[in-house]
Image (cartoon, rainbow, N blue to C red):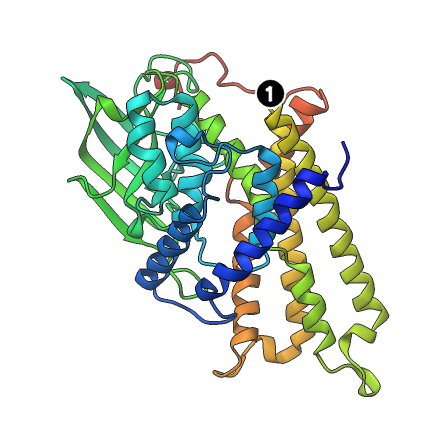
Amino acid sequence: MDFNDTPEEAAFRTEVRAWLAANAPAHVIPQGVALDDTEEVQRGRAWQRAVYDGGYAGITFPKALGGRGGSVIEAVVFSEEEAQYHLPKGPYIGIGLGMAIAAIAKHGTEEQRQKFIEPTLKGELTWCQLFSEPSAGSDLANLRTKAVKEGDDWIVNGQKVWSSWAHRSDWGILIVRTDPSVPKHKGLTFFVVDMKSPGIEIRPIRQISGASDFNETFLTDVRIPDSNRIGDVGGGWGVCMTVLMGERLGSGSHKAQVSPLLDYAASTPGMNGGTALDSGSIRAALAQAMAEEQGAKYLEARLRTMVSRGENPGALAGMIKMSYASRLQKTSGLAMELRGLDAIAPSIDDTLTRSIQYDYIWSTVMRIAGGADEVLKNQIAERVLGMPGEIRMDKDVPFEALK
């Protein structure tokens, strides 16, 4: 493929830049400024509404569902340009756009598409992901939260964990076990659940950063109508794969980390009256990070082109997520080194260093979230490189027979 913009793509990029220059600055969160959860979600909804009103929300979704009816490449162009601004686009927005409505569009009914897609594109609905459990993270199919059919409803009991922003979300995407008598991947069913449903208890988890982005979510006799089931009973694993591919491809669209670091190095005092950017070792580290970022950018473009052709990148999508997580950890670690001892205990007025410190702490999360590095490497080895599969003693064994 040609990595340069076609004339049509270049024209679209110019249009997007002009629109963002006119609209994004009013929504930008200044670097180092911490908002409380309520204000951040309000600002996230407002920015998403602005994107919708500007005609750029859901670029690949049909116009009949509130989208733009555009191409995957146009969506990539908008994402690249939008990433130049520090905008409120937390998981409460990203999970809805990249995972929930993507799954509903592919596996849901027409009624579900009409109910959820356009309100999410407008920022009216926020979403969380209810996948991981205390005994089901890297091996998601080991989950034990169960649902039993009762009339037209399903009764759900169990516990989820690491539910990002569940405490500020309107809806959740939920996978549960509905048939323990079959092998573990075959007895799962996918639902959407109103987070205000009776029986849902959300307990925030206090993190080392002091924030509480994650939660434990307990579900006790939660009643979900069958009309909120996405896909077939027992077909939840297939819906999950749509969600996880969106999550891993989407991780590559996070804000770039290297360019701000170049500016920071250029403004950090170095030896002999110069700046940190004069150091050969720092320049080499920055060059390495820049090379990795460019490589990931073009890999992401190739995989999104595959999607636009109706092809499924499958396990290859995990490379985008692994690359981003590794790069974030390296660049935030380098930023901490540049700041020196001040990085450990920044002054109360030094918002930039506190922001770098937060990113450094947060970067460890991305080595696990969306599939741990070890799990993704296994998938790539087996499904992309064709290497022998890991021995699985639980294959073809009914879930209820596993210990």
Left or right, 270 with respect to 248, comes to: right
- Say which residue appears at 78% left-offset and 55% top-offset: 288
Left or right, 97 with respect to 70, comes to: left
Residue 142 in sight here: no
Q: Nearer the viewer, residue 270 or 137?
A: 270
Q: Quadrant of residue 297?
A: top right
Q: Nearer the viewer, residue 275 or 298?
A: 298
Where residue 337 sits in the image (x, y, percent)? Answer: 68, 71
Q: Quadrant of residue 364?
A: bottom right
| Residue type marked 1 | Ile
Where residue 187 sits in the image (x, y, percent)? Answer: 36, 17
Q: Is residue 349 above or below residue 204?
A: below
Left or right, 268 with respect to 118, comes to: right
- Say which residue appears at 59% left-offset and 54% top-offset: 17
Q: Quadrant of the C terminus?
A: top left
| Disc 1: which residue | 391
